[in-house]
Image (cartoon, helix red, strand yellow):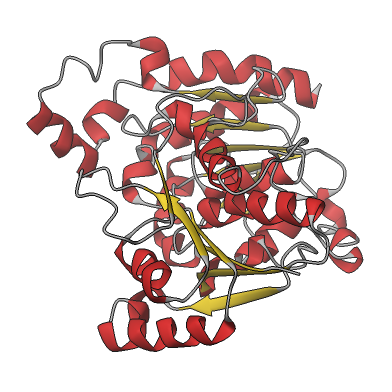
């Protein structure tokens, strides 16, 4: 029996898609013991996953302190892992791989051409282009898995494993008479969030066109921003304000009761897909759509990106201007008008709501 560690110290969507490593390894080796290390706020997407035997919780800020990192390396070494997979591939996780005592370590080579420096026994190049409908981010993780073994059958789809009690959850009775659209009104970061006035226009279009409720989704620290968007909306009677998911696990449970997700690109999109819910994703202009547009067929999962409408919007920018916009993409976001988004959203919602 082999003991495996997967390190994914990043955001919610990254943790969920990295669980495909555990799912596929456990499918071939059911007696293996698999641990997954992740930031404490991301655990909701991997709880109850039968392919993960233990979740190792770490705090993002605390792990950045060198003494805490050394302590964590010592703990990892005591576990005597046979294999460590490192999809995160940043300095902290690389040091854990180098000094964690595992027989085999697999991770991505540095993009800065500084060499492997002995971090991994199996350093792997990041794929240049995607070849699977799952998107390059998932394919990169499966590529790590395949460095050590052959897998005749690969399941590329991340899954959320709800408990029976969670599946029985229902929204209040007064909202059960119409389909509910979960609307991700804000991205996980300001760079992934549309201008407020654009979100309000999309809300008003949905409210005026479809017989449904709209449930705002946002993180607890974004309430004032969500309220600002709500105040810009003309049709407020369709918006649900008294139902809220305070944690990422609560969001998954609530999303399971909704008809579709319409959202800025981020972890919530991956959760909805893992629950087999239709998704309409609005990408930030600086995000590479091929990396994260998983399982899109234009009907069940659909997305829009500025480059779909203005192909040269980014290629004509200078490097300096691109780095500036990467920090504040509002200038590019303003080119992705509500009219562009609604032109694609209309057929998607018509298909899934009518």
Residue 323 in the image: state x and y as whole percent: 16, 37
Q: Which quadrant is home to the N terminus?
A: bottom right
Q: Tell me which residue sits at (33%, 11%) in the image.
A: 310
> Above or below — where is 278 with respect to 75?
above
Please state the total of marks drawn on the protein image: 0
- The residue lying toward the viewer, choosing from 85 and 8, is 85
Give the x, y percent position of residue 119.
35, 61
Splitting the image into 4 quarters, where does residue 246 fall?
bottom right
Query: Residue at the location (35% across, 81% down)?
Result: 69
Query: Going by the image, does 348 lie left or right of 232?
Result: right
Front residue of 237 and 116: 116
Residue 169 vs 65, above or below: the answer is above
The picture quadrant where one finds residue 111 is top left
Residue located 82% across and 39% down the image: 178
How far across and down, in percent of the image, does residue 45 sit? 65, 60
Q: Nearer the viewer, residue 138 or 316?
A: 138
The answer to whether residue 84 is left or right of residue 160 is left
- The residue shown at (50%, 81%) is 76
Q: Is residue 113 above or below residue 15?
A: above
- Is the C terminus in the top left, top right, bottom left or bottom right quadrant? top right
């Amino acid at each position: 029996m082999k003991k495996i560690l997967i390190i994914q110290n990043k955001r919610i969507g990254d943790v969920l898609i990295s669980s495909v490593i555990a799912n596929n390894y456990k499918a071939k080796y059911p007696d293996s013991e698999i641990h997954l290390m992740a930031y404490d706020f991301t655990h909701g997407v991997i709880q109850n996953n039968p392919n993960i035997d233990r979740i190792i919780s770490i705090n993002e800020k605390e792990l950045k302190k060198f003494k805490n990192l050394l302590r964590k390396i010592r703990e990892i070494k005591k576990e005597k892992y046979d294999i460590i997979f490192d999809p995160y591939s940043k300095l902290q996780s690389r040091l854990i791989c180098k000094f964690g005592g595992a027989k085999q370590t697999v991770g991505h080579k540095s993009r800065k051409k500084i060499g492997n420096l002995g971090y991994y026994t199996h350093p792997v190049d990041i794929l240049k282009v995607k070849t699977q409908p799952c998107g390059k981010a998932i394919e990169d993780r499966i590529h790590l898995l395949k460095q050590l073994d052959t897998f005749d059958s690969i399941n590329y789809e991340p899954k959320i494993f709800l408990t029976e009690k969670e599946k029985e959850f229902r929204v209040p009775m007064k909202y059960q008479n119409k389909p509910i659209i979960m609307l991700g009104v804000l991205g996980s970061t300001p760079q992934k969030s549309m201008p407020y006035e654009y979100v309000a226009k999309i809300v008003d279009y949905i409210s005026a066109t479809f017989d449904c409720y709209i449930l705002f989704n946002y993180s607890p620290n974004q309430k004032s921003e969500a309220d600002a968007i709500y105040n810009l909306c003309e049709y407020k009677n369709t918006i649900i304000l008294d139902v809220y998911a305070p944690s990422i696990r609560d969001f998954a449970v609530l999303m399971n009761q909704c008809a579709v997700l319409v959202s800025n690109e981020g972890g919530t999109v991956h959760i909805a897909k893992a629950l087999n819910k239709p998704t309409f994703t609005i990408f930030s202009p600086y995000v590479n759509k091929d990396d994260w547009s998983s399982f899109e067929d234009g009907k069940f999962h659909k997305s829009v990106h500025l480059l779909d409408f203005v192909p040269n919007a980014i290629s004509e920018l200078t490097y300096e201007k691109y780095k500036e916009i990467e920090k504040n993409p509002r200038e590019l976001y303003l080119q992705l008008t509500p009219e562009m988004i609604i032109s694609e959203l209309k057929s998607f919602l018509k298909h899934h709501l009518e």
